Amino acid sequence: MHKAGDVVLGGLFEIHFFSVFPDLSFTSEPQQPSCHGFDVLGFRQAQTMAFAIDEINRNNNLLPNVTLGYSLYDNCVKLGIGFRAALSLTSGREQQFILDETCVGTPPVLGIVGDSSSTRSIAISSVLGLYRVPMVSYFATCSCLSDRQKFPSFFRTIPSDAFQVRAMIQILKHFGWTWAGLLISDDDYGLHASRSFQSDLAQSGGGCLAYLEVLPWGNDPAELRRIVDVMKKSTARVVIVFAHESHMINLVEEVVRQNVTGLQWMASEAWTAAAVLQTPRLMPYLGGTMGIAIRRGEIPGLRKYLLQIHPDLQHNNNNNGNSIINQFWEYMFQCRFAPPPAGWVEAGGALCTGEEDLENVETEFLDISNLRPEYNVYKAVYALAYALDDMLQCEPGRGPFTGHSCGLLHKLEPWQLVYYLEKINFTTPFGDQVSFDENGDALPIYDVMNWRWLPDGKTKVQNVGEVKESAKVKELSLDEDKIFWNFESKQPPRSVCSESCPPGTRMARKKGQPECCFDCIPCSEGKISNKTDSMECTSCPEDLWSSPQRDYCVPKKTEFLSYHEPLGICLTTASLLGTFICTVALVIFTYHRSTPIVRANNSELSFQLLLSLKLCFLCSLLFIGRPRLWTCQLRHAAFGISFVLCVSCILVKTMVVLAVFKASKPGGEAILKWFGAVQQRGTVLVLTSVQAAICTAWLVSASPAPHKNTQYHNDKIVYECVVSSKVGFAILLGYIGLLAIVSFLIAFLARNLPDNFNEAKLITFSMLIFCAVWVAFVPAYISSPGKYADAVEVFAILASSFGLLVALFGPKCYIILLRPEKNTKKAIMGRGLES
């Protein structure tokens, strides 16, 4: 189809589905290839280009005083034919062309609208790019065509597959489909889409491919059976297909044959609107398909223009544009122009009259409610027109070319048009902005389509959203209420290799499988994960611990020897009981202080001993309750001083007993002057002062302090008092032990004294108990963790205190209270005579 003009634009369209190449041997006459199988939609696209040029020529504001022409060729869906057509468009048929003179033949074009195929566009643009002839495709989507080094003059008004792939991934992420299968056609379109899809999917972390299969050319039953078998066995419920409808027809036939249902299909723009697949027989399998579609647009006046098409009866056999229109007419009305093929009329075929009315034919040719490729053709023509208009408005001396020159119409070079084409920016009547980025790609926008299976068995391909992308944002908007899901639940399917790991677990990859296939491993103690699909469990801070569900950190349980727990209650009760018994004994001794048994055993030291034992019992309370700085500092000091005071009294008491016995012998009176009341008090004071000095030095140099210990239990904080200086603690205990051993030895030496001095036996027994308790204390204390170490120390204090109290004062209180007849000087002395 040709139309003359000041500037001619070329076009490549699919007018026929099939072609037959002639014999290309050098012996035969060169012939044109024969094409057949009329494509009415391809013809509509070609007519859309003619309409756009006609509209531009009628527009006084765009290219005034310049008439656009066109030269449109049929590629017959073959690379060789499309390539040949492109070379014819750009090189012309004569040796020389002068645009301002009348010439015979088709003039060379300044730009081409086409091709519809990525493979043909790659081949054609590789050559045209050498001469910088602009080529604006309306349907070639291969991302490889964005390579400006290889295709410097290629542009397109359809988004590249790179964006289509990203749009697909956005939909997958929106519905949480992380496990999908991918089917591709065995051509540039499918292979580049596959590469781009796998790369973007890995970068986005949005999912994994369960399988990747290449659809065979033609009908290969064995290979198709294998592919459908893979789909059937896979756990992936979502199948993404980047292929042409010709590939899908054979695939879907095999899907029907094997009755594979329950799949959610996702269609690339190549077959989203394929009417041949939208049949009642296939909808049980393909219903609910979601697809990416070219942006739908509206072209006012196009239907009226299409209705003006009319055959030329005088040139119906000529090889010119009108013969194409005649073929269209024959296709639309199922008739033949004269002379018809032999036997046509006899077989009942009708002859075309040329008077048929297109409006009376029910056909998709006139349905302009869903213009998609046509809208891209329309934008491509206008892009070339606006670029040419910008160039012609250039002011001489201010141009962008060498010497600030401008491009001139009668000397126009294609590369000059490429310069302006890169900078165009206009808005269509439909409201879409058209411009090209640095790679020649249009601003990406797609419609999201859904195949709705209606109750009457018909199919409706409805728009359920759109996806846009700009330099700043990727936007997907879906009207989910309109989406038809071909499942019993009427809800989106689940398509995951492994279900999400809930909080409290982490993902562990399955060996040898994609990263979307994993096990959910519970977090170990002390670690948590508080979000879904966490890769790692994080450790809780030192003073926190993991909850039972391992999804958040909780404060650790605190442990110390408490007044509220049974052990603390028992020890507190024992301490208070010991204090009470000491008080009772003190009252008894005070009340009976004038009786011989109290006076005979050095009553002053007995009172001091009872007071010191009372302090021993009370100091054990400092070991119970939450450790604080003052209790940690006071507990060992009070314990050490109280016990030294107690043992000092016992030691002095033992020495006094021994001294009195020595003084009862002839010449021993002088020894008593060293053991008077003053000396006794002084000795006790000095011995106690030494312990006080030890405690003071310990507290000043390395004071005990409260400490949160997390070493004993991971989930507990043990509050304890650290002694800070083990040497200080050892000296404190060692000094008590030294005094106890000395007291024990002296009492042991005096154990055989006469009965009236028999307190030495009680002291020996009490010191034996005391030493046994504290010897057992050391290993028990070292091996006991946390609060149990405090409990052992309290137990040792109470046991030794009770041992001293019972051994030293039990017999005396027994005599005072229950055997008063023995609490006389005569009775006490009598025991000595009887023995």
Image (cartoon, rainbow, N blue to C red):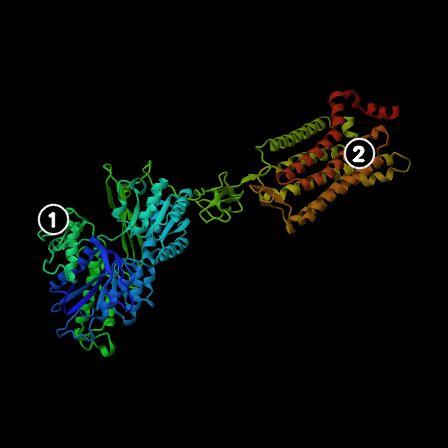
Please tell me which residue is depicted at 85% across the width and 24% down the height of the picture: 831
Mark nearer the N terminus (2 vs 1) = 1
779 w.r.t. 806: above or below: below
- Which residue is the extreme one toward the right? 666
Of residues 255 and 616, the one drawn nearer to the viewer in this rendering: 255
The kind of residue tagged 1 is: Glu
Does the image show residue 51?
Answer: no
Residue type (three-letter) at the residue carrying disc 2: Thr
In depth, the one of 314 and 639 nearer the eye is 314
Locate the N terminus and report the quarter of the image it occupies.
Answer: bottom left
Q: Quadrant of the C terminus?
A: top right
Counting from the top left corner in percent of width and height, residue 369 is at 18, 49
Secondary structure, mark 2, is helix
Residue 11 x, y percent position in the rendering = 21, 63
Question: Residue 752: which quarter of the image?
Answer: top right
- Residue lying at the far bottom of the rendered structure: 403
The answer to whether residue 809 is above or below residue 103 is above
Name the residue rendered at 26%, 40% in the picture. Answer: 280
Residue under label 2: 764
SS class of the residue under badge 1? helix
Hey, which quadrant is residue 581 in on the image?
top right
Mark 1, residue position: 359
**On screen, residue 781 above or below 813:** below
User: Does residue 187 appear left or right of residue 625 in this picture?
Assistant: left
Residue 404 visible, this angle: yes
Q: In this view, does 442 lie to the left or right of 57?
A: right
Q: Which residue is at the front of the view, 230 or 235?
A: 230
Whether pointer 2 and pointer 1 mark residues with C-beta atoms closer than 8 Å, the reply is no
